[in-house]
Image (tube, helix red, strand yellow):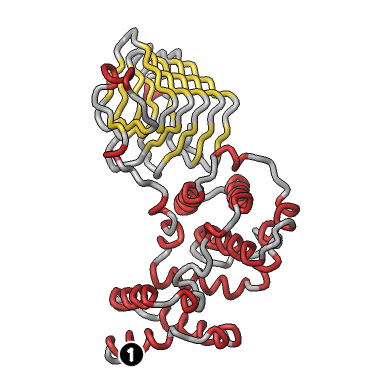
Amino acid sequence: MFGNKKSFNEGMKSGIRLSEEIVKRDTRAINKLYEILKNITGDTRELKETFKEVIKSLENSEIEKLFGIVKTSNPNDLEEEEKIILLQILVDISKRYGSNSNQKEFLRNLTLYFEINFEDLLRENNFKKAIDNIDSKKSEKIMYKIIKEYLYLENNTNNYGNKYNEYLSLFVYGLADNKNIEYEVEFKVIIFGEEILYQQFSKYSYNFEENQEYTYENVEENDKNIEYEGLYINNIMQIKKDETKEISYKNLYVNSYINCNGILKLKKCTIYYNNTEEGNGIILSKNANISIENCNIICKKMDKSIFIKTLGNNKVSIKNSKFLDCSYFLKVGESYSSTQNKVTIDNCDIINCSDDFY
């Protein structure tokens, strides 16, 4: 179709260095390139590598001329309050319309990338008033584009009618450039796949440097001497009958199993589960109890294995806690001998969680 692939790639390198004035004046070049790439059915790995090489070699002023291959503006250019507003809008969309697994990962990665406190996402906010108070045209366009990327992941298209106009209409400058932004999003997906949208922030999100954190080996013996924030459960942890185990003020990564025969108390922790491909969870034997208080619970990925399993006559108390992207968190049913189980979930915020959460 294109003749010599090397010649085509070299042509792409030259053609992509369009002047800014041409890009602004005539978007037909972008549309034509978009259509060409959409029809490529063969192996495009070499082409993708060419794009990567071109991106690396461009000066900052030239990067701004690319149409969605790289970010023309860095989301971290947003002020902290602008980041919070953006995340609040995405959370509100997910609560009203639901979200799929790709959108959940997008929202989770973006939240961690921005390093915004989880509690800030739950604040009430007048979105129109908040957006009207933003003075920067650049900030508005960054926020608008990120929302469009999130919405694209709903059905891998920009065609969702007027469904989200309530949110998109808040951004005057974004709407003015809507068509070009849609081309940018679609072009990016064609080159790198839809994964680029929800993974673009992920390298900043989960940096598990275990050599700088404590890794669980024998919590029973070493617990009193621990002075750190990260606690990794990488091996099976046993809590004996008549034993009360309390874990407080930790970033708790449950990468294996906690077998509880006594009482487990989790206080003021951020609890991560489904972080690895290995099985993980908390198993309550008969007559065992668990309490979770003032914690944040975050699920890394969807897995149909139940995180907290009850085997009979158990007490589960969860208070003043927040759940983000959680699925299959707790199961109290016939398959787990639910006789005389008591579950209390009080004053908790459940955000972006699946129907199978509990």
Total numbered circles: 1
Say left or right for 38 vs 53. Answer: right
Quadrant housing the N terminus: bottom left
Say left or right for 200 vs 219. Answer: right
Give the amino acid at mark 1: Phe
Q: Residue furthest top?
A: 242
Query: Residue 298's image quarter?
Result: top left
| Other-residue count near label 1 (Cα within 10 Å), few / some / many at <14 / 14–19 / ≥20 | few
> What residue sits 45% from the left and 69% below the top?
70
Residue that mark 1 sits on: 2
Disc 1 element: loop
Relative vertical location of residue 39 with respect to residue 121 in this rendering, above or below: below
Relative vertical location of residue 318 with respect to residue 39 in this rendering, above or below: above
List x then y, in percent, for residue 231: 34, 31
List x then y, in percent, for residue 213: 32, 35
List x then y, in percent, for residue 232: 32, 32
270 or 155, nearer to the observer: 270
- Residue 342 seen in the current view: yes
46 or 73, nearer to the observer: 73
- Residue 280 seen in the current view: no
List x then y, in percent, for residue 283: 34, 23
> What residue sits 29% from the left and 74% below the top?
45
